[in-house]
Amino acid sequence: MNLKFIPYYFVLLCLLFAANSSAQNSFDNVIQIDGVTMTADSLRAVPDVTILVKNKNRGVESEYTGVFSIVCSKGDTLEFTCMGFRSKEFVISKDLKGLYFSLIQLMVQDTFYLPETIIRPLPSREAFDYAFTHWRVPSDQYELARRNTDAYVLRALAYTLPRDGRESQARLMQQQAREAVYYGQQQPMNIFNPLAWGEFFEAWKRGDFRRENNPYNSGYYNSGNY
C-alpha cells in the first residue's frame, strides 16, 4: 500500500462519518403525531379540521371521527382550523423522545354575530297596494296545511307521479323475493284462487266498480279544484 494515499483515505472516512452522523440526527428529528380533535365542552369528535405545519405549506385533515396523523419535525408548530371553532396552535417540543407522539386537541366553539338583515317582500308602496287589493292570500297556515294534505290531492299525486329510485328499487326487491319463493316451480295464478274470486264478488256487490264511486272517473282532478 502506497503511503502517500493514506491522508486521502483518512479524509474520505471523516466525510463518511460526518454524513452518517448528519443523516442520523435528521432522522431523529422527525416525529409522527397521531391525535384526535374533540370539542372542549362535550368531548365530541370534530371532523374536517385542517392541521397545517406552520410556514411549511403542508398538512392533513381530520376524519369524520376526528382522528388525524401527520409527520413533521421536532420544534414545528401545528395550526388547527375549522369552521365554527377558534383556531389553535400546538408547538412540538424539541425535547420529545422517540418517533411517535399522541395528541388530543380540544376545539372551542366560536360564535359569529352577523349584522341585521331586513327583508322587504315588495319594492314600493304601490306594489303593496296592488297586492293588498288583488292577491288572494289564505287566511292562516291551517288552511294551507289543509290544502296540502287533502286526501284527493295526495291520491292524485300518488296516481300520476312516477316512482323515484327508492320506490323502484323496493318494488324490484319485492318482485325478486316473490320469485325466489317459487324458484324451480310454477308460480300460482290468482285466477284459480277462490279467495280472490270471493273478494271480487264482494266488491262487485258493494258497488266499488261503479263510475260514481271511482274518484279517478269523477272529473274532480280535471276540474282544477285540488
Image (tube, helix red, strand yellow):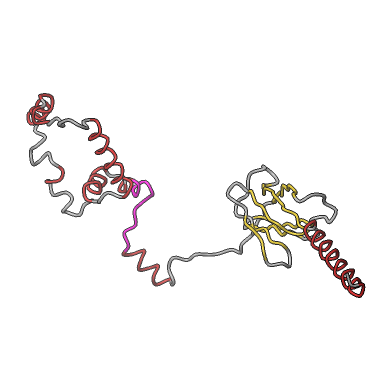
The correct choice, above or below, for 113 with respect to 182 in the image is: below
Q: Is residue 94 left or right of residue 38?
A: right
Figure quadrant of residue 24: bottom right
Q: Dividing the picture into quarters, in which one does residue 29 lie?
A: bottom right
Q: What is the number of callouts on the image?
A: 0
Instruction: Find residue 113 and report its horizontal and vertical position in percent.
Output: 64, 60
How far across and down, in percent of the image, does residue 146 sit? 32, 45
In-front residue for pair 12/120: 12
Membership of 161 in magenta stretch: no
Task: State the residue in front, 147 or 186.
Answer: 186
Instruction: Give the residue at x 35% y 68%.
Output: 130
| Above or below, comparing residue 7 to residue 136 in the picture | below
Residue at the far bottom: name it: 4
Side of 33 where 169 appears, left or right: left
Q: 125 or 183, which lies in front?
A: 183
Residue 189 place in picture, x, y as percent: 12, 31
The residue located at (43%, 71%) in the rendering is 125
- Where is residue 100 shown, x and y percent of the image? 74, 49
Determine whether, in the image, residue 31 is placed left or right of residue 140.
right
The residue range painted magenta reads 135-145
Which residue of the protein is positioned furthest toward the front in this rendering? 1
* Quadrant housing the N terminus: bottom right
Magenta residue check for 136: yes
